[in-house]
Image: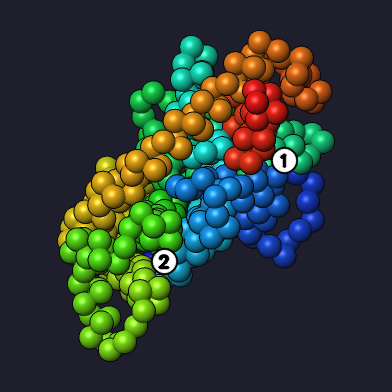
Amino acid sequence: MFDHLAATPELSKGRLFKENDSDHNRSPYERDRSRVIHSSSFRKLKYKTQVFIESESDYYRTRLTHSLEVSQISRSICRLLELNEDLGETVALAHDLGHPPFGHNGEKALNIAMQDHGGFNHNDQTLRVLTHIEKRHPNFSGLNLTWESLEGIVKHNGIVLHNIPFHTYLYNNKHDLLLNKQPFLESQIAAISDDVAYNNHDVEDAIRAGLLSIDQLQENIFFKNIINQLKKEYNIIDDKLLMFQVLRKSMSLMIEDIYKQTNKNIIDLKIKTKEELQNYNNFIVTFSSSMKSKAKDIKLFLFDNVYNHQNLLDKRQNVEKIISDLFKYFYNSPNKLPDDWRSINEPIERVICDYISGMTDRYASRLHKDLYE
């Protein structure tokens, strides 16, 4: 269908560092996906918060399970549009590698600690992880992903024009990622797949946590219509099974909407080449205006009923204190850093920031307890 707009492995701009590799059985994007999955940073996502603190239940989503779910949605949409599934999956799997422990609250605390030293941004940190922090090769730092994978990961939220984060700026000087142009369609798909995932899966986790009920869910018109339809289809269904069916139907509707609207956008805009889609002033992969409105309502519903729930707010203040305390401790006692971190020739603030951002929730909590309690 739109395979002419797909990223083409054979025409890849390649990797920053040349490698002597005889693996001709896999495309460059397949190898990128493998490098992400086998990285230390990817494994540690298993114990990093998505919305609910990881240690509170084995059932809540973590950054790892969220990334896997985003990649599955991304692959499905890429397949529907006949785009490059491997690249779409790689961007989805890697997009959250820069998240610190405790989700956005950990990011907030690190950004405050680093406000006079370049700040902290999880998207910038993801690029830093992929190109600097991961150590897998004797001749260079980072995973040495292809240009297309890095470009897609850096710009999965759109072009980067103003206030370019420090590491992104430095890396872009060596390997121009065309920050002023739109990313490939596969990256745009990974971005909207992220929205589909958390707009649905956060609902399930909130119900499991007791912050939401099926009755409350019906305050949202989109979910109410699905629930009414399912209750007609199944005369008797308990709330747990109803929840699973609601989210299955919801995601199917969203994916179908993205597929149809993106088709329409490409045809209406007469997009014929990859250069034309990169030069367009907005994303081409979108919801329809109707579904966009519904997705916005879901996000507002989640903010009102889940993200700003008092139970979560109380815990967030505590985890921000953990990050802040750890940063102060290592700043005042840099000799307490592990040996391999003390030997890094960079400003001590950035070394500490990298060290803490790579921690899991449980390690940060345990270390803070050992140091302060």
Q: Which residue is mark 1?
A: 18
Of 111 and 3, nearer the camera is 111
Q: Residue at x 20, y 72 (%)?
A: 225
Q: At which x and y percent is residue 288?
A: 22, 61
Which amino acid type is marked by label 2? Ile
**Left or right placement of residue 11 versus residue 239 in this view:** right
Q: At which x and y percent is residue 297?
A: 21, 54
**Left or right placement of residue 187 versus residue 15 in this view:** left
Mark 2 falls on what kind of element? helix
Q: At which x and y percent is residue 43?
A: 66, 49
Badge count: 2
Please tell me whether mark 1 or mark 2 is closer to you in this view.
Answer: 2
Quadrant of image for the C terminus: top right
Q: Measure the C-alpha gap from mark 1 to mark 2.
A: 32 Å
Mark 1 falls on what kind of element? loop
Q: Quadrant of residue 313?
A: top left
Q: Residue at x 41, y 36 (%)?
A: 314
Residue 234 visible to an observer of this rendering:
yes
Which amino acid type is marked by label 1? Lys
Q: Residue at x 54, y 50 (%)?
A: 56
Of 6 and 208, nearer the camera is 208
User: Label 2: how many residues lie within 10 Å, few (<14), some (14-19) or many (20+)?
Assistant: many
Q: Residue at x 64, y 23 (%)?
A: 372
Nearest to N terminus: mark 1 or mark 2: 1
User: Label 1: how many residues lie within 10 Å, few (<14), some (14-19) or many (20+)?
Assistant: few
Residue 145 is marked as: none
Q: At which x and y percent is residue 243?
A: 36, 71
Of 215 and 123, nearer the camera is 215
State whether residue 355 is above or below residue 196: above
Q: Which residue is mark 2?
A: 77
**Left or right placement of residue 204 versus residue 258 in this view:** right
